[in-house]
């Protein structure tokens, strides 16, 4: 009985304890189901978003950049198919070994490659846009050594078929096809096109990527047509190169403009730079100095000073402005004249012979206020707003900052700094009957055959009356005739108007004008009676005879001669040439 | 029949990876055949078969330490042709039979410390130790819990069990703090998002899988998390993928099926008049129940990460076979005792 009782009791106890175990497991399962409900139903939204983010990778598809053409439709910048090497780190076996092998072809330290191959990313670039021959070598190596996890993707690379010819003007686009300099940078928003994308599904290792539904094709960038003419550009560079070689000059620039429209026809900067290999040059060498670097123009500025004096009628062309002196004293500063003439010189001859004393006298006739306002009106001290980035304003000081002798210096093209683009724009307005045109280099933006934007010539203002402009052209024509400083710019069959300039450079050590280094320049246009092209030639620090008339004028002549021939410009009436000569 | 309805989703889960599918199918066929055979063998034979089975288990446990296939630093598997077998899984069943037998034999003496509790604990301790050497802490803990549950239900004094608890605390402490990965798992348990790419990775991926599933899931075979995002997707974390593909509906259905199976197990145990049968049935029920609870809790982040498979569903042949065998035994007990009870 006792025994039965205990057994009865332990039986009951067992029943209770089994039920306790059942309850524990039931509670456990209920907790699991509640938690499941919380995660799957309440957190559904945010958790699935995070999950999608890790499953999908949006890969940007690079669009092709637009093509750049010259005014005749010649291609100046295109895209080439090139290959880029990538790695899927999770599939790499021996990262060190692979890195060491690859470093023989990829210009990168193997330690850096190893780090990339070991990264926890699903995808890493090893080398972008490599030389096709190197790509073949790497492919062979991968095959021979059974390297896994390394692949190639086709990309496009900007190529400039004309190499150095347009380096400074067109600039270049970088590895990611973004314009970094020149037209490529300035018009990047049009050239670059629109990125496309493809959504890739991926697994945690980043491999086994397969495309999903999301896809947007990239849109090719717009094409750009320049006002530049490759032939004229070529002539300019060729002649500039010759001159620099001959005179051992430091550098040089030529800019050619259609004075009637403001279209830039050529823009040459030396030493040149090849945009295909931009990385080999210092950023300072990429600069388009025609717009970015102001310099003291020297006597070429006399064109503007004389135009201003005639416009304000403070002097007449035949009025004597020089009386045989060899120097002039302005507030204690002596300005010497290079002209050694016993007799007097008229206003016209002061320009023709580039007399300093005469020019100072013309400037003083105007007075500093009028001289300043005319220079300002001609655009000095302000940007021309040409569609090239990095344009400088140059330096034109306010008259209250002028010293007493500034009037003399400015009249001679000193104490003022101008950019080549400012000077050619100003002188072009003399050639264009006194109308100043806004300079520009891009004439059209096209989308396939459709013109998206057409740029029309834009008149900025009238800076001179037609009579003054015509008189100035006559005076400038005499510069290029016998006895003028620009004789060497004369071209058979055409009348040329122009002005020489020989500016002393400022010696950076002493802060004074150097007597060894000059900027030799010539600015002019032809044919004088119906100008087709205005040209500015600047040669920096030529050796030997540094006169604008001896260094820059022949460059002008050679360029203008070929360009006029190329343009089929009608030659100037022979009779008129004879007539002028008799004068 | 519960096992089969839960085994089918388990097979479907793996049907995109034939490697696992083929092996799991072989085990499933062996398991079903064995289950049918075992369900027709009188459970009382297990009592008689105990000694050879006990010896075999101990032998295999020692054998695996010497000859076992090493995977990730653990020797848990013995190769049999193309299949691998885990002796630790077998030891679960052996322990259950041992416990049922000893409780039936000793009766009230189980309350006695020197004669009841201590000898039982020594045997269990031997098993647990051998398994921990592999190491396979998950199975060792499971065996410990099963044994303690049976001791508890079998009438052992609560103070003895508590004494054991006090004794085990410093042991667990050293175990956790001496293995960096266990400590890491514990830390991660508190805040997995703190270290989402290393220690928190697995549980976060499990959350993402479950969270993506929503109410009805993304569809069978459409789950993305199994693409290597979720480690152990086909074994310990198979429930996350099930939740991703079949949603809360599928996940809760699986839990419900477990609940039904466990409920039936408890009913069989409670109704059994034979003491050996009662504890055998209870042991089997607790084995399946506790593993299901721990696995689901780990996968849903209620418990720190622990390598315990989900019965019938996780990939793993030995586990499947043993669970099927256990169900066969349960069926036999049910058949014999339902008539009389």
Image (spheres, coloured by chain):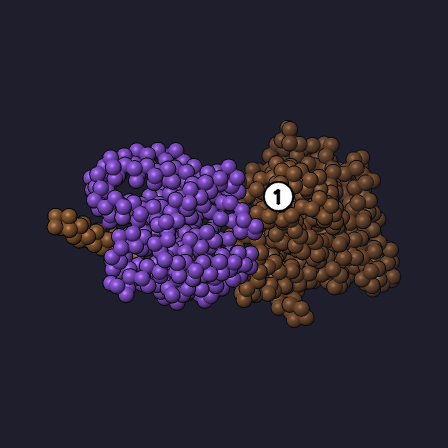
Chain colours: A brown, B purple
Q: Is residue A496 visible?
A: no
**Residue in the image at 43% along x and 37% along y:** B133
Number of labels in the image equals 1
Q: Which residue is under mark 1?
A: A93
**Residue in the image at 76% along x and 38% along y:** A249
In front of the other: A45 or B54: B54
Question: Residue A244: x, y in percent?
Answer: 79, 41
Relative to A212, A467 lies left or right: right
Q: Is residue B121 visible?
A: yes
Task: Note whether A545 is above or below A450 in the view shown.
Answer: above
In front of the other: A511 or A94: A94
Relative to B21, A74 lies left or right: right
Question: Residue A483: x, y in percent?
Answer: 82, 46
Looking at the figure, which quarter contains the C terminus of chain A?
bottom right
For this orientation, the residue located farthest to the top is A510
Question: Residue B234: x, y in percent?
Answer: 47, 55
Task: Note whether B57 is above or below B174 in the view shown.
Answer: below
Question: Residue B70: x, y in percent?
Answer: 52, 41
**Residue in the image at 51% along x and 49% along y:** B84
Q: Quadrant of residue B173?
A: top left
Task: Note whether A531 is above or below A2 in the view shown.
Answer: below
For this orientation, the residue located farthest to the bottom is A450
User: Quick one: SS at disc 1?
Assistant: loop
For this orientation, the residue located farthest to the left is A1
Q: Chain of mark 1?
A: A
Structural crowding at the residue carrying mark 1, measured as other residues with C-alpha within 10 Å and reported as few (<14), some (14–19) or many (≥20): some
Q: Quadrant of residue A521?
A: top right
**Residue in the image at 57% along x and 47% along y:** A90
């Amino acid at each position: 009985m006792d025994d039965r009782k205990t057994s009865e009791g332990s039986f009951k106890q067992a029943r209770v304890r089994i039920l306790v175990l059942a309850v524990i497991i039931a509670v456990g399962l209920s907790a699991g189901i509640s938690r499941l409900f919380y995660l799957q139903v309440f957190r559904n939204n945010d958790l699935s978003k995070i999950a999608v983010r890790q499953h999908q990778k949006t890969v940007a598809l690079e669009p092709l950049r637009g093509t750049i053409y010259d005014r005749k439709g010649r291609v100046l910048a295109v895209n080439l198919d090139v290959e880029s090497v990538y790695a899927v780190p999770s599939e790499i076996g021996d990262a060190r070994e692979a890195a060491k092998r690859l470093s023989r072809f990829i210009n990168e330290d193997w330690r850096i490659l190893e780090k990339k191959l070991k990264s926890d990313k699903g995808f890493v670039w090893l080398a972008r846009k490599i030389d096709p021959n190197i790509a073949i070598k790497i492919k062979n190596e991968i095959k021979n050594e059974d390297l896994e996890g390394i692949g190639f993707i086709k990309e496009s690379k900007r190529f400039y078929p004309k190499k150095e010819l347009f380096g400074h003007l067109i600039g270049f686009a970088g590895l990611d096809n973004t314009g970094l300099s020149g037209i490529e940078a300035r018009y990047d928003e049009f050239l670059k096109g629109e990125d496309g994308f493809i959504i890739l599904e991926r697994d945690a290792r980043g491999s086994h990527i397969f495309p999903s539904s999301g896809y947007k094709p990239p849109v090719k960038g717009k094409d750009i047509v320049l006002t530049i003419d490759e032939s004229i550009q070529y002539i300019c560079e060729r002649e500039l190169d010759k001159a620099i070689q001959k005179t051992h000059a430091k550098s040089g620039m030529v800019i050619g403009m259609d004075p009637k429209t403001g279209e830039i026809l050529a823009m040459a900067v030396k030493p040149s730079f090849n945009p295909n290999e931009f990385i080999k040059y210092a950023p300072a060498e990429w600069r388009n100095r025609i717009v970015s670097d102001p310099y003291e123009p020297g006597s070429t500025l006399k064109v503007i000073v004389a135009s201003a004096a005639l416009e304000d009628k403070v002097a007449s062309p035949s009025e004597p402005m020089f009386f045989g002196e060899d120097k002039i004293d302005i507030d204690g500063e002596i300005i010497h004249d290079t002209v050694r003439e016993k007799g007097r010189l008229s206003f016209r001859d002061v320009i023709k012979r580039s007399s300093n004393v005469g020019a100072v006298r013309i400037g003083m006739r105007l007075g500093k206020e009028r001289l300043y306002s005319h220079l300002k009106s001609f655009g000095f001290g302000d940007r021309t707003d040409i569609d090239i980035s990095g344009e400088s304003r140059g330096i034109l000081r306010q008259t209250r900052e002028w010293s007493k002798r500034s009037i003399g210096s400015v009249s001679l093209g000193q104490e003022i700094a101008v950019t080549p683009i400012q000077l050619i724009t100003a002188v072009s307005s003399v050639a264009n009957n006194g109308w100043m045109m806004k300079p520009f280099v891009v004439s059209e933006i096209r989308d396939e055959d459709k013109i998206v934007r057409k740029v029309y010539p834009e008149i900025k203002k009238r800076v001179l009356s037609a009579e003054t402009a015509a008189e100035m052209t006559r005076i400038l024509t005499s510069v290029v005739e016998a006895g003028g400083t620009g004789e060497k710019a004369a071209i058979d069959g055409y009348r040329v108007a122009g002005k020489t300039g020989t500016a002393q450079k400022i010696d950076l050590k002493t802060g004074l004008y150097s007597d060894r280094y000059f900027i030799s320049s010539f600015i002019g246009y032809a044919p004088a009676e119906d100008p087709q092209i205005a040209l500015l030639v600047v040669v920096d620090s030529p050796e030997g005879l540094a006169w604008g008339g001896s260094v820059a004028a022949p460059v002008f002549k050679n360029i203008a001669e070929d360009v006029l021939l190329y343009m089929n410009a009608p030659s100037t009436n022979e009779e008129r040439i004879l007539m002028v000569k008799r004068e | 029949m519960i096992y089969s309805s839960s085994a089918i989703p388990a097979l479907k889960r793996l049907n995109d990876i034939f490697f696992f599918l083929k092996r799991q199918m072989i085990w499933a066929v062996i398991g079903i055949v064995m289950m049918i055979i075992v369900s027709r063998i009188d459970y009382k034979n297990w009592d008689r078969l105990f000694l050879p089975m006990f010896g075999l288990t101990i032998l295999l446990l020692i054998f695996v330490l010497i000859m076992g296939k090493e995977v990730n630093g653990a020797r848990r598997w013995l190769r049999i042709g193309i299949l691998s077998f885990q002796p630790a899984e077998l030891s679960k069943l052996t322990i259950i039979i041992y416990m049922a037998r000893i409780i039936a034999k000793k009766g009230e003496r189980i309350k006695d410390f020197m004669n009841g509790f201590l000898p039982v604990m020594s045997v269990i301790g031997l098993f647990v130790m051998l398994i921990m050497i592999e190491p396979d802490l998950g199975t060792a803990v499971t065996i410990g819990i099963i044994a303690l549950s049976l001791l508890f239900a079998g009438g052992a004094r609560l103070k003895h069990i508590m004494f054991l608890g006090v004794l085990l605390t410093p042991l667990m402490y050293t175990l956790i703090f001496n293995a960096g990965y266990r400590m890491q798992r514990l830390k991660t348990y508190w805040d997995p998002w703190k270290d989402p790419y290393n220690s928190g990775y697995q549980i976060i991926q499990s959350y993402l899988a479950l969270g993506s599933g929503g109410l009805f899931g993304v569809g069978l075979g459409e789950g993305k998390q199994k693409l290597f995002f979720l480690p152990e997707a086909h074994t310990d974390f198979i429930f996350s993928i099930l939740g991703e593909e079949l949603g809360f509906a599928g996940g809760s259905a699986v839990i419900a099926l477990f609940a039904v199976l466990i409920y039936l197990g408890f009913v069989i145990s409670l109704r059994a008049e034979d003491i050996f049968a009662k504890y055998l049935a209870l042991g089997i029920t607790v084995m399946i129940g506790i593993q299901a609870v721990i696995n689901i809790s780990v996968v849903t982040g209620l418990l720190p990460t622990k390598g315990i498979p989900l019965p019938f569903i996780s990939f793993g042949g030995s586990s499947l076979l043993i669970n099927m065998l256990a169900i066969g035994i349960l069926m036999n007990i049910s058949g014999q005792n339902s008539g009389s009870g």
